[in-house]
Amino acid sequence: QLSVHPWMDLELVQQTKRGNLRIVLPSGLCAFTITCVPLPEAASKIIDEYPEEATAFLQECRGEEANGTETEGEETDGIEASTTVLPEIRSNRRSSAIGDSVISGSTTFWSALSEALDGDKKFSELGLGSILELVLSFGPQNHGPNMLLKSNKLEIVAVDGAIQEESLDENGTAPEDEGEQSSIGQTAAERLLSNEEASAAWSLVANGIASGFQLATAAGPIMEEQMYGICIIVTKIEIASHLLVSSEEPSLQTLSISEGANIDTASRFGPLSGQIISNIKDGVRAAVASCPARLVEAFYSCELQCDQQQLGNMYGVLAKRRGRVTEEDIVEGTALFVLGAALPVAESFGFAGELLTRTSGAATAPQLAFSHWEVIDLDPFWRPTTEEEREDLGEEVRESNFARRYIDAVRARKGLATDKRIVVAAEKQRTLARKK
């Protein structure tokens, strides 16, 4: 069930068609078409658990040195220099099990990430080919569990004059009917760029796209928290043809926007790089908000000991806080049980006190340590739609929807807008008498 949360009063969300969005800069100099798809959970875990390898992988793809500096007195190729340094970085990290495979070394990290991406059926249906060759950035902070890709069929076109806004259909493509086209006739004004021109156009906008992606993944649209498991694909780039004439960024120069009208773009809209960053950030957030969203919560691993007589009360405390027992063993020769459990971090406050109270002190204080991230398989914006659901659950199911309660609590703590109403039903309000 797709339901955009009520406080997302953004114009871009209304223009987005299920993760497909065309972003047009206010100055009309550039336009970007992006698609938002979920990243396979296995790939997100690999990137999240190995941030140094993810950063080094990006540096090698960009032809940069892993340490960010060049050797004095030597001129070496960026890829060769990074290859010599990367094994030293990765050799300092211990091997760790991810799923059924063990990641150790640069080759196995790349192969495991590629296998996780290619092994997902829905992701492989996109037809991106060799995905690792298309990676532009991880986010946030260049090593987060989100990925920015450029499509293997990326189109970079030049448009004469100012670029106009144009809505997309459900498949994320422009309308084919000429009556639905804008007055400029965008299809007729487009021309594909040569390899040299496309490379120059890409270098002009690449850093802005990556920076906007970093900002968007650092603060998502639901709770202004970091995103997890999001993949953004850049499918098309449109750029004003006059920008390709000069290699300088149009920050302080007067440009001819359309039909000989000279407009100072710097004074009205700011530098081109700033326009790209801000609009890509808003566009990525709007694309994510238009898709069905789920929360990702942190889990603790805890070890517990309890007497056999109070074992049922311990299970009750764990079930109340949505914890689950992962292993159970008994100490030979005694009546003590040793349990291993996974407990949500959000439900861990006051856990030790309640555990000791319910078990009459028979349980030991829990030893908590961070374990992993896990997706809450519950739509926080679900509402009853059928008559039977409305009769049983009512119009709002917020009390039983703990994911929605988490969102409301976090947004209220941060001072963000919520849809909480002071007066729910005005006709049912009454003035209570004050009795002395």
Image (tube, grey):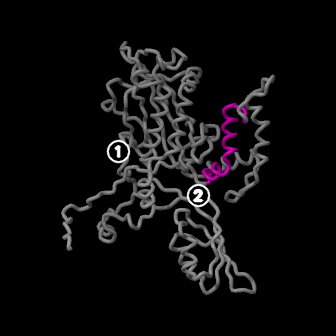
Nearest to the observer: residue 110 or residue 250: 250
Question: Which residue lies at the image location 20% right of the left edge and 73% below the top edge?
Answer: 435
Which residues lie in the magenta part?
42-66
For the residues labelled 1 and 2, say whether their Cβ atoms are less than 8 Å apart: no
Q: Is residue 51 magenta?
A: yes
Residue 398 versus residue 228 in the image, above or below: below
**Quadrant in the picture for the C terminus:** bottom left
Q: Which of 45 and 42 lies nearest the eye of the viewer? A: 45
Quadrant of residue 19 within the rendered picture: top left
| Secondary structure of residue under mark 1 | loop
Q: Which residue is mark 2?
A: 373
Q: Which residue is mark 1?
A: 9
Q: Amino acid at mark 1?
A: Asp
Residue 206 is a magenta residue: no
What's the residue at 31%, 69% (across, down)?
388
Q: Name the chief secondary structure element in magenta.
A: helix
Task: Give residue 119's position: percent from left, percent from top.
Answer: 62, 52
291 up-or-down from 128: above or below: below
